[in-house]
Amino acid sequence: MYVILIYDISMIELRQGAKVSRNVFKICKKYLTHIQKSVFEGELTPAKLQKLRNELAQYLREDLDSVVIFKSKQKKGLDKEFWAADESEKTSNFF
């Protein structure tokens, strides 16, 4: 399946938030292609998506942080537009 992952890590507790953000970034980068600051995309099997979720659960604070996953069975159904800097070369392998 094709996945777009977006995360938001709270910096209310600055030191802890920075640590969580670093760990979440590293885990997401293991599975997906980094698109923007907290946005990743790529193909994952259901098993790898579950593994990603399990790894992130070790760091995410349920009362402060959030992760949104958009899933599509086919990447062909998605159109990508860049409204400012065109970063299509970063993701040209996917669309």
Image (cartoon, rainbow, N blue to C red):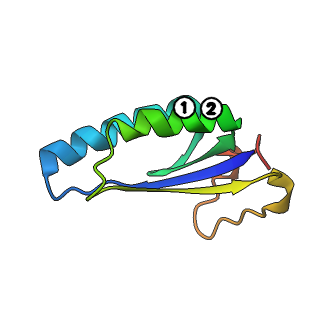
Look at 77% across and 40% down and name the residue there. 93
Q: Secondary structure at mark 1?
A: helix
Look at 66% across and 49% down and name the residue there. 3
Q: Quadrant of the N terminus?
A: top right
Residue contact between numbered discs 1 and 2, judged by CB atoms under 8 Å:
yes
- Residue 40 in percent (x, y) is at 56, 47
Task: Count neighbours of disc 1 (C-alpha within 10 A) and say few if under 14, some if 14 to 19, many if 20 or more.
Answer: few
Q: CA distance from mark 1 to mark 2?
A: 5 Å
Residue picked out by circle 1: 51
Look at 24% across and 38% down and name the residue there. 19
At label 1, the amino acid type is Lys
Q: Foreground: 7 or 61?
A: 61
Q: Secondary structure at mark 2?
A: helix
At label 2, the amino acid type is Lys
Q: Is residue 65 above or below residue 2?
A: below
Left or right of 19? Residue 78 is right
Q: Is residue 81 above or below residue 91?
A: below
Look at 60% across and 38% down and name the residue there. 49
- Residue 9 in percent (x, y) is at 32, 54
In the rendered image, which quarter is residue 59 located in?
top left
Task: Count neighbours of disc 2 (C-alpha within 10 A) and say few if under 14, some if 14 to 19, many if 20 or more.
Answer: few
Residue picked out by circle 2: 48
